[in-house]
Image (cartoon, rainbow, N blue to C red):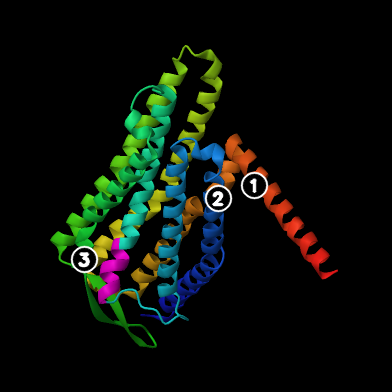
Amino acid sequence: MNSSIQNTFERRNQINQTLLIVALYSIIPLGIIFNITQIFVYLRRKFTETTMSVYCTAISINNILVLIATGLRFIAAIKIYDYEENNYIGCKLASFFIRVVFCACTWLNLLFTLDRLVFILYPQRFKYFRNKINVIKLIIYVYAFLSLLNSPSFFIDSSIIEIKSLNSTELNSVCTASPELSITREVVAQLFGIFMPFILIFLSNFELIRKVINSKKKVSLVRDMHFGIILVISNIFFLITFLPFSGLLMIIMIITVNPTITLNPEIMSIVALYETNAFIIACYNYSFGLFVQICFNKLFRDEFYTMFIELNGFVKKNRLNASSTQN
């Protein structure tokens, strides 16, 4: 490796390390705080009157799990931390957990879209899905299905390889698997865990918009149309931010099938930088949904402001009580 290539490689690594540290201490904690805030809003009475609160709460909890998994991934990639993810347990459990929670995002959004579709278009039908206990059972079934779908991750192994650069030699742990296992795992997970629910989401959105446009209920047309458009925009944004992660999974499959690729530090520096950016782009969607809801969802915005006013009043009341007690 000549000096110019070495400099490029080191520059990419430095940029990647900076992005990892900045994201770990900004996007990840802020995203967790914002999702917890959303959960408190969704647990307020006006939301808990319908099953929408169950889906929205489940999505926020899953977003928190995604951010935690991503944070651990970032810690493993940051050199100043002594944490190795690609060990015997990590190659199995970390890969399994990340895939389940990321795929759950698409399925939970699909369930939420179908719930709103049924609520708007068929208010007197599908009574089974209006029961919150049944909705919780349905969400549990989704996680069970995704766990089964990603169970091949438990057959991934860990290997140690030697990577030589211009000035040093490093021993790195990598996850390895047979080509058959890796390709099967990726194709099944991508098809049924990502693309199928995305296709169903947009078919549901199309049906919702079509029905609303052709509806004879002129009084509720504007309201339902507004909600449908917001849902479509949210799902399109979700798809755009998720696609780089989908591409990352394909890259990981290729590396798992052919671990000798990791011997080339030039390629791996590009892969590492792409991986970091793919996770960061995805995390924007999982972190800042609070502001999307505040901007476009009037009910959420009203409840958020009301909750903030109540919290502010509660804090002021406690301060007055504390000061009066001291006096």
Magenta residues? 88-96
Q: Residue at x 32, y 32 (%)?
A: 128
Quadrant where the image shows the N terminus: bottom left
**In this rendering, which labeled residue sits more in front, label 3 or label 1?**
1
Other residues around mark 2 within 10 Å, as few (<14) / some (14–19) / many (≥20): few
Answer whether residue 202 is visible to the viewer in this image: no
Name the residue carrying label 1. 307
Q: Secondary structure at mark 3?
A: helix
Mark carried by residue 40: 2
Q: Give the amino acid at mark 3.
A: Phe
Identify the mark nearer the N-term, 3 or 1: 3
Q: Is residue 77 above or below residue 67?
A: below
Task: Decide which of 182, 72 is in the foreground and name it.
Answer: 72
Q: Residue furthest right?
A: 327
Q: Judge whether residue 91 is colored magenta.
A: yes
Q: Is residue 203 above or below residue 261?
A: above
Counting from the top left corner in percent of width and height, residue 147 is at: 26, 55
Name the residue carrying label 3. 154
**Location of residue 154 (image quadrant):** bottom left
